[in-house]
Image (cartoon, rainbow, N blue to C red):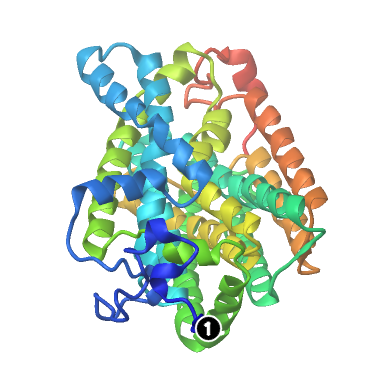
């Protein structure tokens, strides 16, 4: 009997033998990393649909059963445009599979690139959902500014508390504790603290002055725009730090994390999208996300004015939950597979992009459109953000995690969600709160 090692055809995964990372020992696409090699070229419709439906993990696969809501949302929006509540509900649910496809296609595309570039690009694709929502909201004018402000901080809180908590919990269910590299946790945590300070300084300035209100408002707007430019510079320095000066360190950390992946062998044998199919999937998902964002945002005013849903709850909780769904699924799956450095890179990287890239972008776009989009956040939002950054920083300090820390993070997020549900709406120029709050709650409302 021959004692030669088994060839590719005799592996433990025969259903995937035509999806080798290296097709017959040769790369099909020049410059593509072996982990992302599909062994095919061009577009194959049946395989494309099958791979997209299978997605990156079991949870992500089950999210794809929500795709009929995308069709229903389109149909109801154009057939019954006055059904505001149902259009919002359907669009909100439909955003989840659309964002999930964007996350998966971004992941497939990122696998074909070097590790550090791939993680950064994958995080950027995840942030596109947020950028689209912010751009659609800012086009609504001044009325949407309070929701955008709440959504900015809500996005960061959803990442730092909910997603990180779920990652700690998921990884802790299979292991006593998980260890991650301080190159990821310390740099990310320090950047978030600096970003948090940069975001709330204009609000502190506005609160400290009690002179002419209009003059303070104008100066706060100018400070917000200047701060946005500085935050953009900080983001560019962060990207240079990751991709150039300290690229080898990050690459080494992520490579060692890949080796710890409990599903690595099976993932290597899974069928993958070609480069062309990855780009096509990104285009399709971006189109769906854009339409769902427009449908959903157009109905937010109805929810606030007629259904008495608070601006703080819409911005801090509802919008971030749906826009970050795909990133959260990816990060939790990585933590489950013992890839905590990858999970932290996605969570902290996404939060940093929100604070240092997406927020300055929406301020700049508002500047160009003549909308007074500033960083004068509510006292509730600002205090919660700083406290969340401090809490998470303490959890990351020892470079270890367990399920208890995960549960605590999620519980803190739930407390914030309950508080946001009862937080009063911002005051209109006439002194009256939006929605059904009336003059009483408007007078009781204070800005930070």
Task: Give whichever of 362, 156 is nearer the camera.
Answer: 156
Q: In percent of the image, x 57 and y 31: which residue is there?
A: 312
Secondary structure under the numbered disc 1 in the rendered image: loop
Is residue 296 toward the left or the right of residue 231 in the image?
left
Give the x, y percent position of residue 21: 37, 71
The single residue placed furthest to the left in the displayed view is 42
Q: Few, some or many C-alpha atoms within 10 Å of disc 1 (few <14, some 14-19, many ≥20)?
A: few
Q: Which residue is mark 1?
A: 3
Q: Is residue 418 visible?
A: yes
- Decide which of 294, 169 is in the foreground and name it: 169
**Residue farthest along the front direction in this orientation:** 1
Towards the viewer: 198 or 31: 31
Identified at 82% across, 49% down, the residue is 404
Q: Is 146 on the left-hand or right-hand side of 49? A: right
Q: Provide residue 69's location: percent of width, then percent of height.
A: 35, 26
- Percent from the top left, x then y, of residue 194? 63, 65
Quick one: quadrant of the C terminus?
top right
Q: Is residue 182 above or below residue 152?
A: below
x and y percentages locating residue 164 in the rendered image: 66, 52
Residue 92 versus residue 225 in the image, above or below: above
């Amino acid at each position: 009997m021959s004692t030669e090692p088994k060839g590719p055809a005799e592996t433990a995964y025969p259903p995937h033998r035509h999806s080798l990372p290296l097709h017959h020992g040769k790369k099909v696409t020049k410059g593509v990393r072996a982990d992302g090699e599909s062994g095919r070229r061009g577009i194959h419709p049946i395989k494309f649909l099958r791979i997209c439906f299978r997605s990156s993990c079991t949870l992500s696969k089950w999210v794809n059963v929500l795709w009929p809501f995308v069709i229903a949302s389109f149909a109801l929006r154009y057939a019954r445009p006055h059904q505001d509540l149902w259009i919002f509900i359907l669009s909100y649910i439909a955003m989840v599979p659309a964002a999930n496809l964007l996350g998966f296609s971004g992941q497939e595309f990122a696998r074909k690139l070097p590790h550090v570039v791939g993680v950064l690009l994958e995080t950027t694709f995840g942030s596109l959902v947020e950028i689209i929502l912010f751009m659609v909201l800012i086009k609504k004018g001044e009325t949407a500014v309070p929701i955008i402000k709440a959504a900015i901080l809500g996005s960061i809180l959803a990442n730092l508390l909910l997603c990180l908590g779920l990652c700690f919990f998921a990884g802790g269910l299979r292991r006593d504790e998980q260890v991650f590299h301080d190159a990821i946790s310390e740099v990310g945590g320090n950047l978030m603290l600096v970003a948090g300070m940069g975001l709330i300084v204009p609000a502190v300035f506005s609160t400290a002055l009690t002179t002419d209100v209009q003059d303070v408002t104008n100066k706060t707007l100018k400070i917000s725009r200047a701060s946005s430019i500085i935050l953009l510079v900080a983001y560019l320095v962060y990207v240079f730090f990751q991709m150039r000066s300290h690229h080898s360190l990050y690459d080494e950390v992520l490579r060692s994390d890949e080796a710890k992946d409990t599903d690595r062998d099976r993932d290597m044998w899974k069928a993958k999208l070609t480069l062309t199919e990855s780009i096509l999937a990104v285009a399709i998902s971006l189109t769906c996300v854009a339409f769902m964002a427009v449908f959903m945002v157009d109905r937010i005013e109805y929810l606030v004015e007629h259904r008495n849903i608070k601006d703080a709850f819409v911005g801090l909780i509802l919008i971030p939950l749906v826009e970050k769904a795909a990133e959260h699924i990816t990060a939790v799956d990585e933590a489950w597979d013992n890839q905590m450095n990858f999970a932290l890179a996605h969570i902290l990287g996404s939060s940093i992009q929100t604070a240092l890239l997406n927020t300055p972008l929406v301020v700049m776009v508002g500047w160009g459109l003549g909308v007074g989009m500033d960083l004068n956040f509510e006292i509730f939002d600002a205090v919660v953000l700083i406290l969340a950054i401090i809490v998470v920083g303490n959890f990351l300090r020892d470079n270890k995690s367990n399920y208890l820390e995960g549960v605590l993070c999620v519980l803190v997020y739930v407390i914030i969600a309950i508080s946001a549900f009862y937080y009063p709406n911002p005051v209109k120029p006439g002194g009256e709160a939006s929605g059904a709050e009336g003059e009483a709650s408007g007078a009781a409302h204070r800005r930070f």
